[in-house]
Image (cartoon, rainbow, N blue to C red):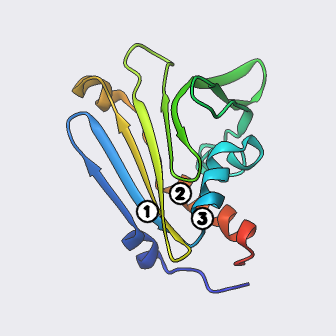
Amino acid sequence: MGLRDSDADVRSRTKVEKSDRELVVTRSFDAPARILFEAWTKPELFMRWWAPKSMGMPLYSCEMDVRVGGKYRIEFGHDAANTWAFFGQYIEVIPNARIVWTNEEGEDGAVTTVTFEEVDGKTLLTFSELYPSKEAFEEGGGILPEQLDQLDELLASLTGDQ
């Protein structure tokens, strides 16, 4: 098993910025952009990292048709009778570089953008959620540091850096 980043190193690789309507999180990963893109677009990989373990509620199902106009539906829960869903459609997809989607669970859903910038085998991921109003932003979700930690663990397993 390889050396893991210290908590300080992980924090220094993650930056969070907020405005009245937008959340922007950036974090660097020791993996190529194509692997990160796969982790965000292949349901079998996405399900391994997206649900924060601390929630105690796994992803029950994950459907992704990652193309412009394609739809996604992600359900949290332990069984079909008790799920909590997120859904929308992809409005921009540039392989290994950018994904943009709508969040259509309610009237005030955000537009989410994830970009992947690779330099020397490391990738800067930028996650942005833009809400239609300040009130919607205050009610919104965002991404949790725990999810990014879980993504980091998945990437290490996929790139053999364990």
Query: In the image, 142: left or right of 70?
Result: left
Residue 53 appears in view? no
What kind of residue is marked 1? Arg
Q: Quadrant of the C terminus?
A: bottom right
Q: For mark 3, what is the residue? A: 152
Name the residue at 68% across, 70% down: 156
Where, by quadrant of the figure, is residue 60 drawn?
A: top right
Distance from disc 1 to disc 2, alpha carbons, whole Å, reads 8 Å
Where, by quadrant of the figure, is residue 79 drawn?
A: top right
Q: For mark 2, what is the residue? A: 148
Q: Is mark 3 on a helix, strand or loop?
A: helix
N-terminal label among 1 and 3? 1
Residue 126 appears in view? yes
Where, by quadrant of the figure, is residue 107 drawn?
A: top left
Q: Do the residues labelled 2 and 3 touch (CB within 8 Å)?
A: yes
Q: In which quarter of the image is the N terminus?
A: bottom right
